[in-house]
Amino acid sequence: MDFVTTNLDWVLFCGGLVGLFLGGDALIRGSVAVADHLRMPKLLVGLTLVGFGTSAPELLVSLNAAQAGAPDVAVGNIVGSNIANILLIAAIGALIRPTATQTPGVRRDATVMLLATLAFAGLAWRGSITQLEGLLMVKSLAVFLLVVFLMGRKAAPVPAETAKPMAIPLALVFIAGGLTALVMGADALVHGATRLATQFGVPQAVIGLTLVAVGTSLPELTVSVISAIRGQNELALGNVIGSNLFNILAVLGLTAALSPLPVSPAFLRVDLPVMVGAALLLWLLTIATPRLGRLPALAGLLGYGGYITWLATNAT
């Protein structure tokens, strides 16, 4: 029976990896095709379709956690995901292929992401997010998206790719199928890896801080890595910025709009400062440098490693 169970866990683990790869590939192909048809910057598509789509796991986790009476899980999920998005995911993408920061819209979007992060930190410092504030967060995101869309339409048209892109209906099927495969693949991978780790005697605290914590960020990681390999760096950076914006303004906003969301003081000591610091670092890099290179990417990875080490040594 143990042999059969172990094999099923390996099937979940390997199947999850395959689902992540195929889903990420389909999402990128569909998103690039939509951008090409609409003559819109890939950064904008990465910010919306890709960035928000890959945040679906965070939305589900936070809403379920809040309804189950576990607000710390809802808040911790977003804080941890936003830290990982910048220090881990954006860094890995830049290590594979340095990312240009001079693309129109990058500085604007990074600035809005920083402001949203600071606003969330301020509300968290006060101790809670009210229902009215949650609604305002969601409305702020809607206004920002409208402005970005209108600015994107007024900008100079983006040249089409030399190869004829896939038709819009097929591209939308690729996007929907890719997002579904990403979410299902991440879930299968985390479940399989968690069960395997338990069988090998890995402590629950370590499992929670690594496999489960990074699990909801696997779609973003997959998309960013594949985008970087294919040279679609705008898509990768837009994915990170869009995901962080969606996590704060939509996920936390919707969660708080349904019911006031208390924020534990435990987050104020290290986690929130790290999240704000990561957002500030990315913003400074978009302002001061022409591209996100390998040196700051390596520094980000080292910083994330230090943060995870601190979590592991302070786990109760």
Image (cartoon, rainbow, N blue to C red):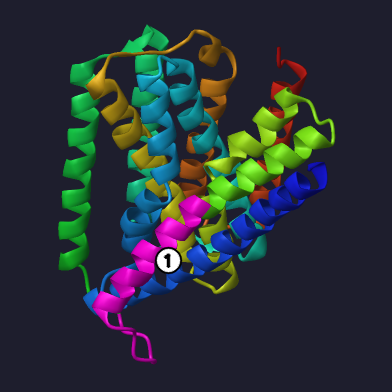
Rendered position, 273 above or below 41: above
Horizontal side, residue 13 vs residue 239: left or right: right
Give the prevailing secondary structure in the magenta stretch. helix
Q: Is residue 201 left or right of residue 310?
A: right
Name the secondary structure under disc 1: helix
Along the horizontal axis of the image, is 117 left or right of 21?
left
Position of the N terminus, as image quadrant, is top right
Residue 7 percent coordinates (x, y): 75, 52
Disc 1 residue type (three-letter): Leu
* Residue of label 1: 27
Q: Residues within 10 Å of mark 1 (few under 14, many from 20)?
A: many
Q: Is residue 264 visible?
A: yes
Visible in this render: residue 157?
no
Q: As drawn, is 157 to the left or to the right of 63?
A: left
Q: Residue 105 lies in what quarter of the image? A: bottom left
Residue at x 42%, y 66% (from the top left corner): 27
Between 216 and 245, the one nearer to me in the picture: 216
Tell me what residue is drawn at x 41 percent, y 56 percent. 238
Magenta segment: 159-184
Residue 235 appears at what percent x and percent y? 43, 63
Residue at the outermost front position: 1
Residue 265 is situated, as x and y percent measured from the top left of the image, at 50, 8
Quarter of image, res 130: top left
